[in-house]
Amino acid sequence: MALLRIQDLTTYFFMKQGTVKAVDGVDLHLNSGRVLGVAGESGSGKSTMAYSVMRLIRPPGRIVKGEILLEGRDILRLSDEQIRKDIRWQRISLIFQGAMNALNPLITVGNQIAEPIIVHEGLDKRDALEKASSLLGSVGIGPARVNNYPFELSGGMKQRIMIAMAMACNPEIIIADEPTTALDVIVAAGIMNLIKDLQTKTGLSMILITHDLSVIAQTCHDVAIMYAGKVVESGEVLSIFDSPAHPYTIELINAFPSIKGAKRELKAIKGSPPDLIDPPSGCRFHPRCRFAKEICNRKDPEFREVGTNHFAACHLL
Amino acid sequence: MAPVSAQIITIAGTIICVGLIALVFFGESLAPYGPQQMVGEILLPPSSEYLMGTDMLGRDVFSRIISGTKWSVSVSFIAVSMSMLIGTYLGAFSGYFGRSLDRILMVGMDAVYIFPSFVLAVLIAAVMGPGIGTSSLAVTIVMIPTFYRVIRSITLTIKESGFIEAERAIGASGRYIIANHIAPFYLSSLFVLISLGAAQAILITSGLGFLGLGIPPPNPEWGTDLAAGRMYIMDGMWWLTVFPGLLIFLAVLGFNLLSEGLDAVLNPQIRRL
Amino acid sequence: MVGDVATEEQIQAIRHDLGFDRPLYIQYLSYMYDLLHLNFGTSLNSRLPVIREISAAFPTTIELTIVGLIFGVAIGLPLGVLAALNREKMIDHFLRAFSLGCYSFPIYVTGILLQLAVSVRLGMLPVAGRIASTADIPKITGLYVLDSLLTLNFAVMFDALAHLVLPGMTMGIYLLPMISRISRAGMIEALTEDYIVTARAKGLAESTVVYRHALRNALLPTITVIGMNFAGLLGGSMLTETVFSLPGLGRLMYRAISSRDFSMIQGIVVVYTLIVVAVNTIIDIGYRFLDPRVKY
């Protein structure tokens, strides 16, 4: 049974200009011990989905519909107190995009890692700091750094600290939201290796959000492709890369340059991401799709099985 | 369109200010008695005949307060206008032409700006002796730096814009450019500054009056009357101080509301704090 | 100084006394020397050394300013935080209106109204002055509250405190609009930062998030603004001391200005400047403790 099952998750932002349908009926599942990659362009709803799972959506945003089943229990039905005490950080934690701003500049990193430990595991300050120290060691940072402030550390180090912090209460699931976007390539590679390492060692389950398909190819077991607030394709990594079904997935894979093979021109996807206040009718990708037919304009395609454990939403399949 | 709260504030402020200006011009005619007129017994509490009671010389407090509007408010207006003219002029030239003129002016303005404004006003009043001219001058000098700084800052920003360079390329003179192309950018800030300045001016003028350094008796200035009424509060004669105080408050509030409202309306921000 | 009718000899005698007949550069150097030794000369009013009168008046103003700051922060800071947490709701508008109201009251009107309401009408607190009788106040620092506390003379201490309540509240009301405005803005700014989302995600209680994470950051601009506006406080003390008959620097300055006591005016202006510089330095140093990013 899936550890985490997201069903028909719908999160809207109610703004003055209109309602932004950031996540519009998303189905995902995460199996125990596996890494699920979530890929898509900026604005596809990936981060909003992650925040919705943690119930961090604040007005003007609201989770309108759906269920998020953690081991069969719908966490969207829990009270705020229960989410705070039982779920957040203890069972599911988050690694934020851009660690630069995700850490409080006025508090030492040690204290920031220790905070959730003190609150959730009841340790006193000294023990919590000790645990924080060893956590730093496990992500490759000298334990003495507990007393440093965020501004004293480099971008890569801060990201490692975010990882250490996410592991502080031994969660079952870690959601990593674009952990390497703000970093240069070499540092990013180090971070991804660290994440992969930790995941195999501890066997925790992970949702890895990124727009970088190469990262997904290297680190994930399963992948879901999101576009304009919906999941357009999902399945095991090998199936998706071998035989992508949805036109968007095909374009996405083609857009990435390959080191191997002959040199060729970069193929961008024509058009630009849709306005989520007033998304295109029918299939949301149809204005940019090479294969679009008349039905694609009229009807929203069903998310169907197109292979073993391989689902996609397209009229042409 | 600005949020409803901003509109309410602006309207409220405008009503009060318009009311005050009306009192400045028509105050004395509307008052039941003359400000120096001794109408009855001294130190009578408020009644239907004397709405705000009588003072220590038997004058009607209500009439004095109404007639007094013109003193506090018109001095403020004169002072703010002069401040605005001088400060804007200097700020514009300082910002546009820069170099030594700018440096000298900045130092001078900073010196005035940092000094506690009320103390400075008191000093000026002391040197020059009490009177209406002194009050105007003191308030003017104290407020020039604020206008100067804001206008200078706007000028510096706009100066670098492309269209200004285009004007220079055509051969327009500095004065022409400032007057015709940069000046429109001053307007929204000026409106806010003027109403803020008016509020501060009233505070300083009546403050000077309170210390006996302002508009001399027997003129019915609010601050002076307030000070005169002070010695009677121990005997419970509150009307001599409360009413002038309330009027000063109302006048300052009116201008503050106006400036807050104008700021909200004229300077909408993407993320309003 | 000698009056309007004076003989030539009298004028010359005074000139010699004051050293005005020396060459200008000597006068200037002598003046600088005196200044560095805090010798401001003699008061034209009381014929006493200026520095002595200033030192006598100094503690009063310090006490008043400190109490005023305490009131201002104790009321203004929570007000600002409350407004920020309830942004755009009724309570926010109400608190901002209250703040604007306080801002519109001239400080002397606030003082007099408080005197009327609390002292005269209700008889709850003393109307004016620093203390009821100056009989047995130990003179260590000149700060009555501190001195009486140190000598465990509680009766005197409470009396001194009672006399400080109304003037302190007056100054506090004068300060709170500025403090509440900047703390509100600071809190709103801090609450939109990413690290607040992190704190919530960690499952911390909302109060921890607000006070431990947001407020700490909001305090920084608040303290800066207090320092920047400190000079205004000195101006306010002049009026408050007049209303409450407190023998402080403000009242001394007023008297000096009224009687054209130039040496005294000069002396007090220098002292004001020193106070403003000192306060801003203290704030600078304090800032370094609060914000680890500030380098030495």
Image (tube, grey):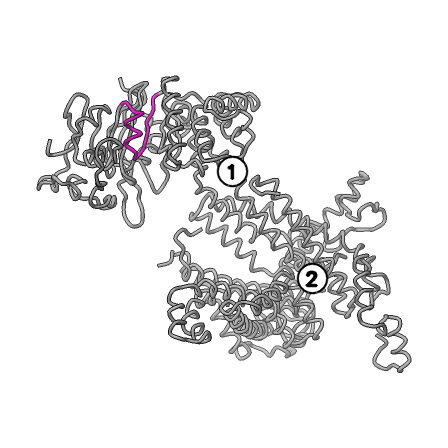
Who is closer to the viewer here, A100 or B240?
A100
- Rendered location of residue C117, percent (x, y): 64, 55
In terms of image quadrants, where is residue B69?
bottom right
Q: In this view, which residue lies farthest toward the left?
A: A294
Please, what secondary structure does the residue beneath circle 1 have?
helix
| Residue drawn at (31%, 49%) of the image | A16
Q: Is residue A212 magenta?
A: yes
- Rendered location of residue A255, percent (x, y): 23, 37
- Rendered location of residue B190, percent (x, y): 47, 67
Q: Is residue A43 among what the camera can see?
A: yes
Q: Is residue C260 above or below residue A33?
A: below
Numbered tag placed on residue C142 in the rendering: none
Q: Is residue A315 above or below residue C86?
A: above
C-alpha separation, residue under disc 2 versus residue under disc 1? 59 Å
Q: Amino acid at mark 2?
A: Ile
Q: In this view, which residue lies farthest toward the front?
A: A262
State which region is magenta: A205-221
Q: Quadrant of the N terminus of chain B?
A: bottom left
The residue that mark 2 highlights is: B233
- On the same chain, marks 2 and 1? The answer is no
Chain of the residue where label 2 is placed in the rendered structure:
B
Chain of the residue where label 1 is placed in the rendered structure:
A
In terms of image quadrants, where is residue A315?
top left
The residue that mark 1 highlights is: A151
- Rendered location of residue B259, percent (x, y): 48, 63
